[in-house]
Image (cartoon, rainbow, N blue to C red):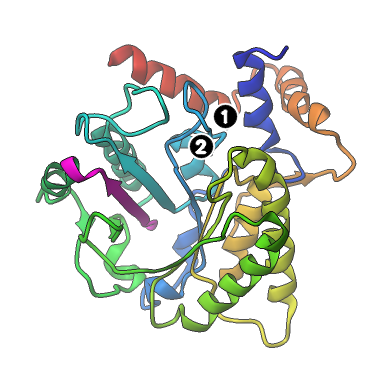
Amino acid sequence: MINSFHLYRLLIFQNVSETLSYKYVSHKWMKKIEDDKLLSAISIPGTHQSNRYLKTSEPMFQAWGLHNQLDAGVRFFDLHVSSDSIKYVKTGSVQESETLSYFLKTMLTFLVKQKKETLLLRITPDEGAVARVTKLLSRDDWPVWRDKEIPTLGQVRGKIVLIQSSTLELGLSVHTTELNTDMDTKETQMKENIKKASQKCEQEMMLTYTVANGESEPLKIAKTLNKQVDNYLLNLKGDENRPHCVGIIAMDFPGPKVIQTIINFNGKLGEGTQIVVDSETSAAEESHAPDEEHHEEGGETSAAEESQAADEEHQEEG
């Protein structure tokens, strides 16, 4: 029986896509996009239930913590805030020591270092937490875009851009599409939803969730669905009538490959990112390959391990 530690390592290094490992992060990909480009017209990789990564979270929706997601190029984040205490973010059935302030400050720290980037954040607070979340996000000393008008990228570089949710009206309105629970039709729905987003993204904020909506095994669904998303976008990008953008695509357990495919829809912006793909490598081999590489290179710390260490340090401080 696999213990929680080995499950952690398996998911961290598997990352769903057919990805063996990656050495370089993609944390500066927005810097080559023109300042006058509307934010809606940028193709943006995102995560669904961004804070539900391993530990005691059930079900889990991500293998990476926030630090890794940022470094991998993710720029849209989806958080759910508990009504029990505004201090905590919902991470599953057990309340954990990760606060909303911690997530916001982690994002802002990233933006201090990467001033050309922008981060999009959609928060869904429980009914009892709305007022306090609104107050926290309204702090004048935080660079947060709360307006309802779609900005250009130049207007929001170095800022967190709020995206409205069903319970929070701060920020940009967004047209959202989701998949139903019928697995047999998910691929068709996904393609239709991305196509719809591509037709409107130059004028509207478009958010496509390609996730296991209502499913009890999001990792299992993501293994199939993320590959389908990647293949569809690659085919779409190669079409002579390719769209200019596909909006925000939010995923469960995205790996570097599908993230990079979305980034590259904006042009070849993934400078510094190296993706090593081996479609014949088994899941078990994928889970061990980075460890072997780590030992051979004499102790170089992977992004995944750095993120785990940062998360553990944060919990100890809490």
Q: Is residue 52 visible?
A: yes
Q: Which residues are magenta?
A: 116-128
Occupied quadrant, residue 20: top right
Q: Are marks 2 and 1 in contact (CB under 8 Å)?
A: yes
Looking at the figure, which quarter contains the C terminus? top left
SS class, disc 2: helix
Residue, far right: 280
Q: What amino acid is found at the position of numbered circle 1 in the picture?
A: Ala
SS class, disc 1: helix
Which residue is identified by label 1? 304
Q: What amino acid is found at the position of numbered circle 2 in the picture?
A: Asn
The spot of residue 105 in percent (x, y) is 27, 37
Q: Is residue 125 above or below residue 92?
A: below
Which residue is identified by label 2? 68
Residue at the image point whose x is 65% and y is 54% from the top:
258
Occupied quadrant, residue 240: bottom right
Q: Is residue 226 above or below residue 195?
A: above
Residue at the image point whose x is 42% and y is 37% from the top:
51
The spot of residue 291 in percent (x, y) is 72, 21
Q: Is residue 268 visible?
A: no
Query: Which of the labelled discs sits on residue 47, or is there none?
Result: none
Residue, far bottom: 241
Q: Is residue 249 left or right of residue 119?
A: right
